[in-house]
Amino acid sequence: MNATASLTTPTTATGTRPGNRDGYAIAITVFSTVKWWGRAALPVVFTVPKIAPQTISTLQRLSFIHFARWSLIREIPYNGAPQPEIKLRHPHLYFESNFNGGWEEYIDAFSHILTRGMWLFWGSSYGFPKALPTGPFKAYIKANEMEASHFYSAYPQATATQITRALELDELLADLRARAADMPPDEFAAAFGTLMAEAQRCC
Amino acid sequence: MLLDLTALRDGNRCGQASAFMALTPIKAGHEDLLRADLEALGAGDGPSPLARLPRTHFGRWVVCEDFVTDPSQGGADTMGCPHLIFTCCIDGDIQSYLEELCAELAPETRMIWRHCINAPDPAEGADLVRYLRHNQIDTGLFYSAYPNTTVGEVRRVLRQQAALRALAVDAPMLTAEELQRRFLAEVGGS
């Protein structure tokens, strides 16, 4: 949402257009034109992570991503005149990400950590200059990116890392929460201390 | 990480979460009017209308003028006219979410989709759900860092995390009884 974003966006959100921010949350929206062979290759690329989820573990290392999606557009839905009826010459790849941090940092991390994956997703797109070095890739994304006119996050002040850690903490807390009311105070205090030490290590 | 059979059957799903996208054609000359209406949503200190749909994690409206043509592709590919992209990441199934969107946010949906070609007039309710479904673009791959966590659960664990941090700061100054009492009151017992 643009209005609150201007007040709350962290200074680390470098390179982010105003419409693509809501608090710490950043939106990226990109179209690219796909070569003929991407029509067959991309559905395979999309299916592999569903059959072998470990292949997407690299994406999980990009811990600042909340949600991301890829879609292959082969035709434009037709609604009748006066909409021009269009037959696309190429398929088009739609990509969007909901993340936190800054645009520059996001593209840098994406390029360095997901180098091979980037080729799998965008190697069939016209003009894709390879993930590294990042300069030409950033120019490519900028040329293909669109600014949102309205962007909303349900928890604009939370980073993806903060949420995954809060979920880990919740699991850690479950046992103490269940027993807390029935424990003698000294036993509770000792258990609380142990839990906080564990929480510092993992969450 | 386990095999996600639901996602295998339906690319719009990842765990309990769903991704929706609609691509709707904008009436000639309406791009700037639509942009102005979208930028006015939640202007000032007001919340986004999507905040009224508690199943929404993220949502966006984007006015897309056309595809970008790369010099190497040998000829432009066009959408025919500018299009409105609406996407959201939500809890649960798409159909019931769209029904909620087109009912609860009717004042906003009327304002937005009136700019789109052959959208129902007024743009709300079951007719708008059908229009959005007709213009839906299926997702090939949908990724979530926390696919089985609802918006409500995200907010709950964040509140719990903040409460526990505050309690940890105060803990050295509290007796065992005070610590336990505050834990039960602020973090919660089951």
Image (tube, coloured by chain):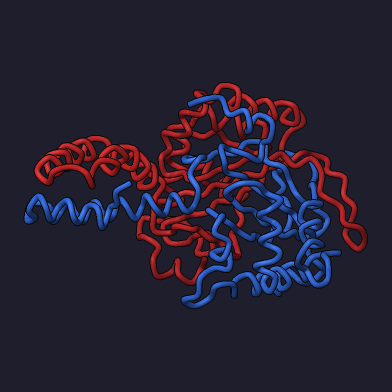
Chain colours: A red, B blue
Q: Residue B100's quadrant in the figure?
A: bottom right
| In-image side of B91 versus A83 (left or right) | left
| In-image side of A134 versus A178 (left or right) | right
- The percent position of residue B44, horizontal first and vertical second, equals 49, 78
- The percent position of residue B56, horizontal first and vertical second, equals 56, 55
Q: Nearer the viewer, residue A184 or A83?
A: A184
Identity of the residue drawn at 87% across and 52% down: A78
Identity of the residue drawn at 79% across and 65% down: B116
Q: Please tell me how many numbered marks the rendered image carries.
A: 0
- The percent position of residue B152, horizontal first and vertical second, equals 47, 53
In the figure, A82 relative to B9: above or below? below
Q: Nearer the viewer, residue B183 or A146?
A: B183
Q: Single out the residue that lies furthest toward the front.
A: A182
Q: Single out the residue that lies furthest toward the top.
A: A52
Identity of the residue drawn at 76% across and 65% down: B125
| In-image side of A141 versus B118 (left or right) | left
Q: Nearer the viewer, residue B2 or B114?
A: B2
Q: Single out the residue that lies furthest toward the right.
A: A81
- The percent position of residue A41, horizontal first and vertical second, equals 70, 26
Identity of the residue drawn at 75% across and 49% down: B136
Q: Nearer the viewer, residue B80 or B174?
A: B174
